[in-house]
Image (cartoon, rainbow, N blue to C red):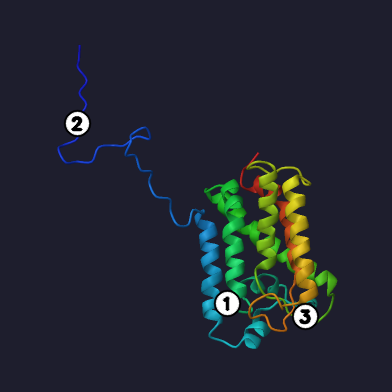
Amino acid sequence: MNAAYFEAPADGAPRPQHPGDPDFRPAPEPIVNAPWPVVALTVSIVVAYLIQSRFPLPLVSAAFAFSPSLMLEGHPERLVSSLFVHGNWAHALMNAAFILAFGAPVARYYGPRLGGVVAFFLFYLVCGVLACLGFAALHWGQDAALVGASGAASGLMGGAARLIGGQGRPGPMFSTAVTGMGLAWIFVNLIMALTGGALIPGAGDAGVGWEAHLAGFAAGVLLIGPFGWLAGKR
């Protein structure tokens, strides 16, 4: 009969630890525990504003902001370009934090394969586009400028609410998580609509695109499932 041999650690070499050992120490958690597409999107917001901050805001807004009037004049590209410019550092960092928080469960649901990564980025962009269109619906033809990723980030929030309600998969459209987060988001945006930019650092007299926030949230709630099919989810 052949004997099995197990090599013992050399003297002084660290021995493998097990959870039952008295001196067991778990491996430290990474500082940012989010899928790489979420980290990449978050970093892109910060880097884009770092570049943008070198130019006057009116110039940047004229070149990239979404406007209902410009859309009617044949500038649909502003539906996307406006998602990557912001009013100030506070605006950019708040949206980056929202994306990091609510994008992680959405990206984990879609998965790390190519189809899942593509689905995640398309979901984000489509929510942002629909958020802009929601703003345009209530400001039809007006020369009102809209900048920021808040609508797209709200879409990630809506998608995350569905996933919370379904314990990792899209749950009911009106689950407790969706209605609770939705009502809270409506309340927050109602306050912002009444106070304008008074509660947002550095906003000054600028208004808040609450219409885009709510439209983006609704888009996320509705589309988290269909984009899952694109990622190969069943």
Numbered disc total: 3
Horizontal arrangement in the rendering, residue 11 relative to residue 36 (left or right):
left
* Label 2 sits on residue: 8
Q: Looking at the rendering, which quadrant does residue 53 occupy?
A: bottom right
What is the x, y in percent for residue 219? 74, 57
Q: Which residue lies at the image location 61% right of the left edge and 79% below the top edge?
A: 88
Which sits in the foreground, 223 or 181?
181
What is the x, y in percent for residue 191? 77, 69
What numbered label is drawn on residue 160? none
Task: Please state which amino acid type lies under the numbered disc 3.
Answer: Ala
Q: Looking at the rendering, which quadrant does residue 59 occupy?
A: bottom right
Q: Give whichever of discs 1 and 3 has the lower sequence position.
A: 1
| Distance in Å between CA atoms under marks 1 and 3 | 21 Å
Task: Please state which amino acid type lies under the numbered disc 2.
Answer: Ala
Q: Quadrant of the C terminus?
A: top right
Task: Please state which amino acid type lies under the numbered disc 1.
Answer: Trp
Horizontal arrangement in the rendering, residue 205 relative to residue 42 (left or right):
right
- Does dot 2 land on a helix, a strand or a loop? loop
Residue 38 in view, yes or no: yes
| Distance in Å between CA atoms under marks 2 and 1 | 56 Å
| Distance in Å between CA atoms under marks 3 and 2 | 72 Å
Alpha-carbon neighbours of circle 3 within 10 Å: few (<14), some, or many (≥20)?
Answer: some
* Label 1 sits on residue: 89
What is the x, y in percent for residue 140? 85, 75
What is the x, y in percent for residue 104? 57, 53
Q: Give whichever of discs 2 and 1 has the lower sequence position.
A: 2
Q: Which residue lies at the image location 65% right of the left edge and 68% below the top edge?
A: 149
Q: Give whichever of discs 3 and 2 has the lower sequence position.
A: 2
Alpha-carbon neighbours of circle 1 within 10 Å: few (<14), some, or many (≥20)?
Answer: some
Rendered view: 110 above or below 148: above
Horizontal arrangement in the rendering, residue 22 relative to residue 45 (left or right):
left
